[in-house]
Each structure stands twice: as C-alpha cells, then as structure tokens.
Image: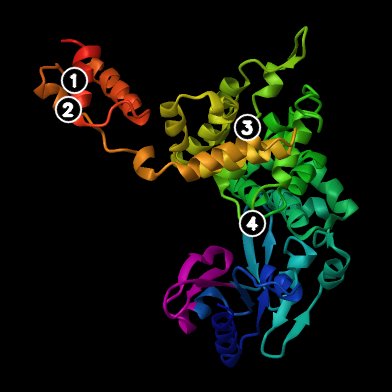
Amino acid sequence: MKAHAISIIRTLREAGYPAYLVGGCVRDLVLGREPEDYDVTTRATPEEVMRLFPETYAVGAQFGVVLVPSPDNSFTVEVATFRSDIGSSDGRHPDSVRYSQEAREDVERRDFTINGLLLDPLNNEVLDFVGGRKDIESGIIRTVGEPELRFAEDKLRLLRAVRFAARLGYEIEPATFSGLSKLAPQIHQVSRERVADELNKMLTEGHARRAFELLDATNLLAEVLPEISAMKGVAQPPQYHPEGDVWIHTLLLLENLPRPCSRTQAWGALLHDVGKPPTFRIAPDRIRFDGHVEVGVKMAVEICRRLRFSNDDTEQILALIQHHMRFSDLPRMKESTLKKFLRMPQIEEHIEQHRLDCVASHGDLSLYDFAREKLASIPPEKMRPTPLVTGEDLISHGYTPGPRFKEILAAVEDAQLEGRLQSKEQALEWVRQEFPL
C-alpha cells in the first residue's frame, strides 16, 4: 500500500505537480506505527489526476478527491487537491471548495495538528506548518486554528477528537476541550451512521474505557447515548458489586474488553445493564433492579435502531443482554436446557461477557469455569444430535399437522438431549404414550 502511494507521488512529481503523503498515515509513521491506509495531497486538480491515472474513481471530485486503485484493485489511495474549504451549512461538508496552489493552505483547513503533517517520501522529509510534531511529542490533541471554527466546519470532529485522544493516550488541549464541550449538542447534525461508526471504533480499538470517560467529560455522552449517561450515580448492592455504581461497573467491563473485540461483544458489554437505571429501587432487604433485563432489551432495541445497526448485529447484542443473568442458573439447569443454552449462536461471546461481568464486580469466576468446562466436554453430536423424530414421521403415524407438532417435537428433543431416548422407534413409542392421538 505504501509503495503504491509513493508511486502515485512519483508520477505526480514527474508531471510537475507537488505531492505529499498527508494526514493520519504521516502521524502513524512518525509514531512508528503501520498506517491502515495512505492519503496523498497534491496541487494537481481532480481532472489532472484522472488524466495521469485513467482508472481512478471520482467519488469525491466535487471536493477535490479521487481514488487511485492499486494495480490489482485490492485497495485504493485517496488523492486530494490542495484546497481551502468555504463555509459549512450542514456541519459536515464545505459549502464550496477553492483549490489552492500551496500545501500550507491545504493543511490549515484540516482537523487536528497531529493530522496536519506532510511527508515527502522521496526525500523522507516531514513538513510541519501547524505544530503537529510538537503535539505528538507532548501527547496533545489540538485543533488546527480556532477550535470552535474547526468543529463547526465538521461536527464529526467532536467525536474524532475523543477517539484520537483515547486511542493514542493523549490529552485534549484546554481550548480544544472547551470548544468541544460547548458544541457537543450540535453532534446531532451528523448522520447516525457516522456517529455509530465513531462509537464502534472507540469500543473496539482497545481503549474503550478512556473513550467513554472522555465522552462523558466533554458532554458528548449525554447527547449520543443518554441511556449510558443515566448510569452515573445509580448505586448497586455492595455485596454483589463492591466496585461501585452501574457506571463504574460498565467502565470496568469496557476496560477489560478483549483485543481484538467484535462490535457485538463491545456493545453487549456496554448495554448489558442499560435497564438498571429505570428499574432501580430500594427494597427492605437491598437495592433491586426488578425486570432490568427485559427493560434493557427494549431500550437496546431503540438504541440499535437509532444507530442504524444491522439486523444481525442487533440480534446478537439483544441476545447478550437477554441471557447475561442466566449464568447463575447453569448448575441447576436440566441437561436439555443447558445444551440448548451452550449451543446459542456465538456462545463464546456470551461466556466472555459473563467473565467480564464477574471481573468487573465480585470476581467469582466459578460459573464461567463451569460453562467453559461443559462446552469443552460435551461432544458436538451430543450438543446438536440428529433429530430422532421429524414432522413427516408424525404425519406417517397419524398425527395432524398443527401447533401441537411444535410441542411434540420440542418434547422429543428435550428427552433426546437428556439421554432418555436413543432411537427413532423408542422415540415414536414415547410420543404415542405421551401425546396419544
């Protein structure tokens, strides 16, 4: 990928156009990290870039951006023309774009100083017009220029500031922090899909706790996830939760998320107790959250819908919430119930969430160990045996299709899972006795 980006720069230079690597890739290279992608900035206009690279995709040509694919079409490099942006009525895109002759002017319209570095890869020279290298050395997130103006141009930068600070372990510079906090209510101008994308990255990049602490500190949490903000100060029974309130408990889960972490695992951890604040009550014996699982599932449905999550992700997140309290019943479950529990889709995420829940509270991992031992010891053919009886079998023995079929087949499966039925003949005889015609 880097070699392709450099070859693009070399072609542009040979055609007489200044060109540099720019943005996050330069930041990561300065930090000694491997960039996820490479961006190029140049004086060449989109039309001139497309003449030099006929296979380009002009997906953002109105903003001076084209994509140049690699020779095997496995990835693309974004090539953007030096420009300055004028106005931003929608808080996301410039009202108009003016091409520039100078790289400095292009850098000065970018979001943060750490993302405003240029690299001449042919001479291995870093150009810094905005103090980005110093802020990298000092561990500072600072806007390029006046914070409120930078954030007003693109409200998504409000979330990006938090994500970069969390990912890199940096502090947000005071004036930037102040501007961010002041404009936090305007985050609603950003599409929900883009908000969700930033939150997904915060949750899965390995620094979720820090990200959510910063979201809270900058007033963004109350705007994008008020249901999580409501966890603060909601006490829990100390005999089960010596760590503190629901907010602290949730932060501890986020702190211990596995790396790498799936979106559904992360959101399951974040939302597993979302139903506690509205169900909080002080009973004579202790603090209680009656029905918090059911309430939490309903709340999570709304959150997933609001953030435009896929049906598959939503289904798994809801399952993680719905079943997280069932681990306490595992040792007492019938064998059929236990096997059905352990064969749930993505059961590993359920077991991992239980571990996270325990580590973030009482620390007792005995039920986690029980689940892992059972999952490892039960052979797949015992967990999901071939059904002994089918609907066709029932019809051939005189049973009429209808709602009763489901009851009969479920009962046969339970008996099979518990080892009480071993063959089709035995199962059909059992059906005739238990469900006479």
Q: Is residue 346 visible?
A: no
Q: How is the image coloured?
A: rainbow
**CA distance separating discs 4 and 2:** 73 Å
Towards the viewer: 128 or 291: 291
Q: What's the residue at 58%, 92% (across, down)?
A: 14
Sequence-wise, which precedes: disc 3 or disc 1? 3
Towards the viewer: 156 or 300: 300
Sequence-wise, which precedes: disc 2 or disc 3? 3
Residue flagged by tag 1: what amino acid is it? Glu
Asked if marks 4 and 2 touch (Cβ < 8 Å), the reply is no
Residues in magenta, as a range:
50-79
**CA distance separating discs 3 and 1:** 44 Å
Sequence-wise, which precedes: disc 4 or disc 2? 4
Q: What's the residue at 66%, 77% (across, down)?
A: 21
Report x, y in % for residue 410: 31, 23
**Label 2 sits on residue:** 425
* Vertical position of residue 107 compared to residue 267: above or below: below
* Vertical position of residue 26 compared to residue 190: above or below: below
**Label 1 sits on residue:** 429
Secondary structure at numbered mark 3: loop
**Label 3 sits on residue:** 272
The answer to whether residue 393 is magenta is no
**CA distance separating discs 4 and 1:** 75 Å
Residue flagged by tag 3: what amino acid is it? His
Residue flagged by tag 2: what amino acid is it? Glu
Label 4: few (<14), some or many (≥20) within 10 Å? some
Sequence-wise, which precedes: disc 4 or disc 1? 4
Q: What's the residue at 60%, 25% (across, down)?
A: 296
Q: What's the residue at 52%, 32% (across, down)?
A: 318
**CA distance separating discs 4 and 3:** 39 Å
